[in-house]
Image: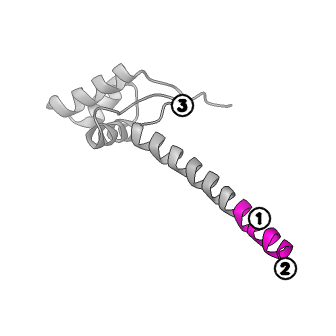
Amino acid sequence: MVKERRTFTREFKLEAVRLSMEDGRSGASIARELGISRNVLYRWRKEFLEDSAESFSGQGKMKASDEEVARLRREVASLREEREILKKALVFFSKESK
């Protein structure tokens, strides 16, 4: 039996985090009440505390810093390719001039 992975909205996650931080109850009791595991709640809390503005951006949506890293990696790959082409051209033209 394959268990389907549940998805939660950003609003649900934010509310769960708010409850766990403001309410006097334990995270385990709040998680149980919401029907999620305690570990999931603590992971959401950690993500929220690390970067509250961009937390829970959703599937396929990267944080701005991750987008920048991906863009820079693509640029580095392109520059390396260009460098290899230039190296080959240098070897070719140096043989031609002899």
User: Looking at the image, which residue is at 19% across and 33% down?
Assistant: 21
Q: Earlier in the sequence, mark 1 or mark 2?
A: 1
Eye-nearest disc, 2 or 3: 2
The CA span between labels 2 and 3 is 54 Å
Q: Magenta stretch containing residue 89, yes or no? A: yes
Query: What amino acid is at disc 3?
Result: Gly
Q: Residues within 10 Å of mark 2 (few under 14, many from 20)?
A: few
Q: Is residue 77 left or right of residue 86?
A: left
The CA span between labels 3 and 1 is 40 Å
Q: Earlier in the sequence, mark 3 or mark 1?
A: 3
Eye-nearest disc, 1 or 2: 2
* Residue placed under numbered mark 1 in the picture: 89
Question: Which quadrant is the C terminus positioned in?
Answer: bottom right
Range shown magenta: 84-98
Question: Which quadrant is the N terminus positioned in?
Answer: top right
Q: Earlier in the sequence, mark 2 or mark 3?
A: 3
User: Above or below — where is 79 with respect to 38?
Assistant: below
* Residue placed under numbered mark 3 in the picture: 60
* Residue placed under numbered mark 2 in the picture: 98
Callouts 2 and 3 close, C-beta under 8 Å: no
Q: Is residue 84 left or right of residue 38?
A: right
Tell which of 13 and 75 is nearer to you: 75
Callouts 3 and 1 close, C-beta under 8 Å: no
